[in-house]
Image (tube, grey):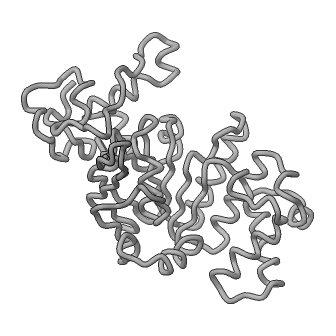
Amino acid sequence: MLLTVEDLHTRFITRDLDDRVRVAEALNGVSFGVGEGRILGLVGESGAGKSLTVTSLLGLLRPPARVTAGRALFEGRDLLALSEAALSEIRGSRIGLIVQSPRSALDPLARIGAQLVRVQRVHRRISEADARSRAEAMLVSVGIPDPRRRLEAWPHELSGGMAQRVVIALALINEPHLLIADEPTTGLDVTVQAQILDLLHEQVRRRRIGAIVITHDLGVVAQYCDDVAVMFAGQVMEQGAVAEVFARPAHPYTRALLASVPERLVLGTGKMLGGPPPDLYALPRGCLYGQRCAHAAAQCAAPPPMSATQSGAARCHFAGLA
């Protein structure tokens, strides 16, 4: 495995007005793996912990959030045990990150070429002329026409789709071994979304790197990902190969997500997700999905293990129950 995450826990530790400590259990034993040349889709409703998982792995948390347990082995090194200086060397070089909003990822006070040159020279010994030449070639590879002119452009002069292509170029230019894309098509129209996802898929396949795609869209996972990890309340509830999990979902939450896709709702064969998410300040001690599960029983008062299923693995006492 290129990346192996084991039992990751992240907490938000604050004090209320009476100076009492309050702890939000945001990530609760997240585990998954990403193989070389494979794309993992990280899915789940808002608040499931998808983006928080990535920021925890990359050392991008800010107080009051902090990792309290777990390991994240990337190319044999535990990311969670590295110093900030060591992580800074890995971010942007060995691991590329594509954030939700390209506008926030690009420096509004620097031209596109300057940003592409800068990210190279931070991580490798390269002349400015060579870095600029590589930047032009990278813009070509991500489908940007007239790259020499685009190098001189300011971020505000780019369309949303063009800006996202530049962000992808920034993430790939140092030839990372792992690419992380956090909702990479947010705010783009449907046609541009498809172009960006096609581009990401092609780049991962051509470069033989691993990738994590964070999304709410199960259609994106079905079309572009090899593996899937379904998250709820800071835990991975089910994981496996996409084709297997979608064909034979073993966890009730996975089945509920699949039933809530817009196409099934329009046809009348689906059902909206029901119930609020659990309170992270007062999580149940047993199954975190138990309060919303139609199959909940006495056994669910105990935390369910991650059990092997026909499609992969599921965190359920009744994994595979129809």
Image x and y of residue 181, in percent: 56, 53
* Residue 240 visible within the image: no
**Image quarter in which the C terminus is found:** top left
Whether residue 246 sits left or right of residue 167 in the image: it is: left
The residue lying at 78 percent from left, 88 percent from top is: 127
Q: Residue at (61%, 73%) from the top-left corner?
A: 175
Answer with the quarter of the image where residue 150 lies: bottom right
Query: Vertical placement of 241 versus 170: above or below?
Result: above
Along the horizontal axis of the image, is 113 left or right of 228? right
Q: Nearer the viewer, residue 69 or 311?
A: 69
**Residue 188 in view of the camera:** yes
* Image x and y of residue 120, in percent: 69, 78
Q: Nearer the viewer, residue 24 or 35?
A: 24
**Residue drawn at (40%, 77%), measured in percent from left and top?**
82
* Image point (51%, 35%), residue name: 217
**In the rendered picture of this protein, how many numbered marks are placed on residues?**
0
Q: Which residue, as the protein is rendered here, is positioned at the far left?
A: 298
Residue found at the far front of this picture: 18
Q: Quadrant of residue 7?
A: bottom left
Please say if 6 is above or below 231: below
Q: Horizontal and vertical percent for residue 106?
A: 73, 59
Image-quadrant location for residue 48: top left
The quadrant of the rendering that contains the N terminus is bottom left
Where in the figure is residue 318, as x and y percent of width and height? 15, 32
